[in-house]
Amino acid sequence: MTPSGPIRVLVIRFSSMGDVILTSPVVRALHLLLEGEVEVHFLTKSSFAEAVQGLEGVHRVWTIERTTVEVEQQLQEVCFHYVVDLHANARSAFVKRALRRGEGRAFDLTVDKRSLDKILLVRTGWDRLEGQHVVERYFEALRPFGDALEALARADDGGGLALPAVGAAKSENPNGRKRAVLAVGAAHKGKAIPESNWAAILKGLLDSGHAVSLIGGPAEAVLSQRLMASHAESVGAAGPQLQDECGASWSRTFSVMAGADLLIAGDTGAMHAGSALGIPMVVVWGCTSPALGMGPWKAHPDTVQLHPVSPERSRPCSRLGDRCRHRVPCIQRVSAERILAAALGLLNQTAP
């Protein structure tokens, strides 16, 4: 490594889509905190590369399918000055170890995930996180370079989330209808809004004259097909009022969201994409909670967050939403009526 040339930084975040999107302010902060020319590289899993490929401030995206062995040798040849580890697990440790070898070893900074504090919050209700968002934890990892939020503020950057430039997908909205996007998927059942609720929400939106697009991964294709079939007779199987985008690429999904007036989602990657795109949202919480630090970051000011009704104690039930401690699961205690009322309240606003 020579002192000439750009300062090269490798940012690591393997998953999930929402977590990768949450790193976007870090990329901009690095360019502000480090002097001279800065070259930011990003390492992630190939399935999440669309969140950073072409993102402003990212020089190159590196991807893996399964293990870091796939890229370690190529990364060593780049001669990084710094590694910013925002994943902090064994895989990212392998990368840091590989880049410490030899004459051109990199200095690494690693996020404090505060895993013990999250465990204490889930198991005992003792909240030592005090509302700290994961993006703030990412910024803390940059502390040796300076105050990231202050640097962003000086640059007139609000520190919000960002996505690669996407054009809003053109959707036919007959008679000036507003369009709602329903993110029907979730990685864990404790975050997944029940199908019966989705059916009621969809019917209510269509009956109110609004257009709807369904988004989700390939795993949600069967659910979306059932929802589509239940309304095909009234709106037409391929009618512009109801569109099925489940199974589309993330880039296409971002475009669909960018053209919407409202997003309804659980605690998912779609929620964080909605924050990045500045879309008003109805966010439905189940077994997880914003107290864990993963709530919407700098979301549209009209965003509504709905939480399960009683019991107020004993939430969050889990860090990931993969289990619930209650007889009636938390996600089922946010009724379709509440979600629909919040959605219609936002869609029917006449003022911006």
Image: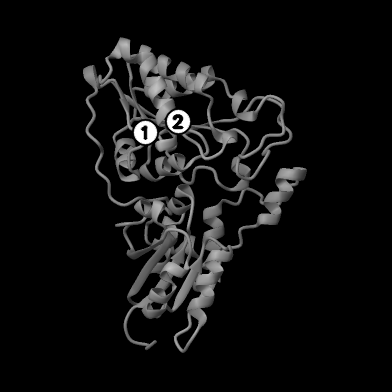
Determine the secondary structure under disc 2: loop
Residue that extends furthest to the right in the rendered view of this protein: 124
Q: Is residue 95 left or right of residue 42?
A: right
Q: Give 234 or 286, whichever is nearer the viewer.
A: 234
**Residue 140: which quarter of the image?**
bottom right
Given contact means CB atoms under 8 Å apart, are the residues at marks 1 and 2 in contact? yes
Q: Quadrant of the C terminus?
A: top left
Mark 1 vs mark 2: in front: 1
**Residue 174: which quarter of the image?**
top left
- Residue 288 visible, this orientation: yes
Q: Which residue is mark 2?
A: 184
Q: Identify the residue at horizontal 68%, vertical 38% (top origin).
A: 317
- Callout 1, which amino acid? Cys
Determine the secondary structure under disc 1: loop
Q: Identify the residue at horizontal 49%, vertical 73% (top origin).
A: 145
Q: Identify the residue at horizontal 52%, vertical 62% (top origin).
A: 86
Give me the C-alpha separation between circle 1 and circle 2. Answer: 9 Å
Q: Give 178 or 63, whichever is nearer the viewer.
A: 63
Q: Which residue is mark 1?
A: 246
The image's mark for residue 178 is none
- 288 vs 242: above or below: below
